[in-house]
Image (cartoon, grey):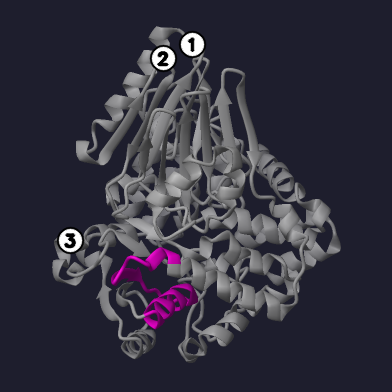
Amino acid sequence: MAILAGYFSFDSALADKKSMINKLVRHFESYPSQDVNRFTCNQGVILQYDFDAYKQPAWLHNDLQIATLIGHPLITSNRSNDLATLACNLGDLDDMLMRSDGVFNYVQYNTEHDQLVLATDPLAVRPYYYMHINNGLLFSTQLSLFKELGIKLTKNCAALSELATLGYTLLDHTPYNEVHRASPAELLSFDKQGHTKRNYLDWQALAQQKLDLGDAVTGLDQAFKSTVAKACKVDTTILTTLSDGLDSRVINTQLAKMGKKVKAVHLNRAPTKIKEQLVEFTQEHDIVLATLNPEHNHLDSLEAVLSALPKNHPKFLKGLTRPTLAWAGHGGNSSLGLTNYSDEVYQAAKSGDLTCLVHKFLEQQQGYLPKSVINHAAELQKELVENLSKAIGQFQSLGLEKAMQLFLLLNEQHHHLDTIFESVDQYKVEYFCPFYSHRVIESALVLPVKKVRNHSFYHTWVNYAYPQICKYPWTAYQEHEFDSLATSEKDSSHLPRMKMRGIIERWLLVVKKDKQKLIKKRQLTALCLLHIFKIKDASTHLSAVVQFTRW
């Protein structure tokens, strides 16, 4: 998504304002100058780092305003035109943003009215973060920037507990008490009177709408294909990712059906049976497949593999229209398949008991802080339960079945996105994720929960739109048993044990960075030794502990 950041103040001391502006400017000087745009005025600064993955600039500056964005709103196939549309319709900005199908962040400063506007996409898949400092507003789409600017920040232990147990934060929490996260479809305005917030899309109102299954399937089909068509209109040869899951199979099939030349990257961690059928799938759709093992090049993620393609596989990239823009299947299983809405959680939701629902969800997620290595774990766990109750309870007027579905739609999307967005300046790869279109997700929200769970609705649509896919086995996640329809729960006992090098690295990280003494270091050291000697698996404990020291 590249990076946007800025600072504005209408009444702070000149010296304080200049200091913050200079810090931001110096930070962005670390990026190649040709990839950075900057606007400064008496009130503040806006900076954009964009490595031109879309081949469509997104920086508009005239006498009335400065407007920019990262990502692609997908109002149309051209993000430069989308930027102009948003910038020229400030009075109707809510309606313009509602037309989007993409993942993006938008910033506009109206020089005539001295008004700053920030907006995130309908799901806040890529949120902006902000804090008030020196009577001004500091914002960034990269959370780590606040710490890198040398600002004094205090850790939000509630948010760290959420990251350690759920993999994402709740409400507007971030790892820092002073920094807040934008909510889905949030639009923030900041001027001399202060800041105001509103949401241009009402998800609760959408959840109250009802459609029959046939209309929902048709609506999903139209929304998905429209989103894909807008996103790939200018491309002839496209870079995609291809996993063992259903989401990426659907995306690759649709792109091939549209006559696009597809080059797909697959990480070869699946059994031989799946590999053979994956090759058969790509041959049937005339997809060029590159099967890569990240461990051969000491790479630890898909983002790292894609980033290293120019160096390691230059011939594979030849002919790509936009070689640093990849298509990924994030979001389909969690939103259309409701993979984290198990039978036990569903029964708890049907009971109407919020407390029971929260505990069943934590049980499903194994969302418990390890008391053996974390200080004050009981108090932090109690606070986690309270915040999870608030996060789900805010939708309780819909009934708990639907409230839980909406909670999952708006929160589970963030589970696997941290590396993609926080480290975008390191990997320099952008993504199209069509399953994050709010119109795609709405199609599942208008149905009764019982018709969506266990991939029921998702599979109905795939059978309707892409029946050829169903003959190939697929998985809902890495550890899932291969099947044509995923129904079983995720079993963490099948997770691979963390290797000794990883254990030592994480132990050192904790020992060096735990300044607030949240971790029981002696107990943690003993646990790591038990892991190294294969007496006990400490992977889960260490993964939770690292979240308390990472930020």
Which kind of residue does numbered mark 3 sit on?
A: Pro
Residue 525 position in % (x across, y down): 41, 44
- Quarter-of-image position of residue 77: bottom left
Q: Which mark is residue 12?
A: 1
Q: Which residues are magenta?
A: 230-258
The answer, for residue 26, to whether it is visible in the render is yes
| For the residues bearing labels 2 and 1, Cβ distance under 8 angstroms | yes
Q: Report which residue position mark 3 lands on.
A: 310
Q: Secondary structure at mark 1?
A: loop
Mark 2 and mark 1: span between their CA atoms?
6 Å
Q: Is residue 328 left or right of residue 449?
A: left
Q: In the displayed image of the protein, which residue is found farthest to the right?
A: 352
**Compared with residue 184, is residue 254 higher up or lower down, i.e. above or below?**
below
The answer to which of 204 and 76 lies nearer the viewer is 76
Q: Secondary structure at mark 2?
A: helix
Count numbered badges in the picture. 3
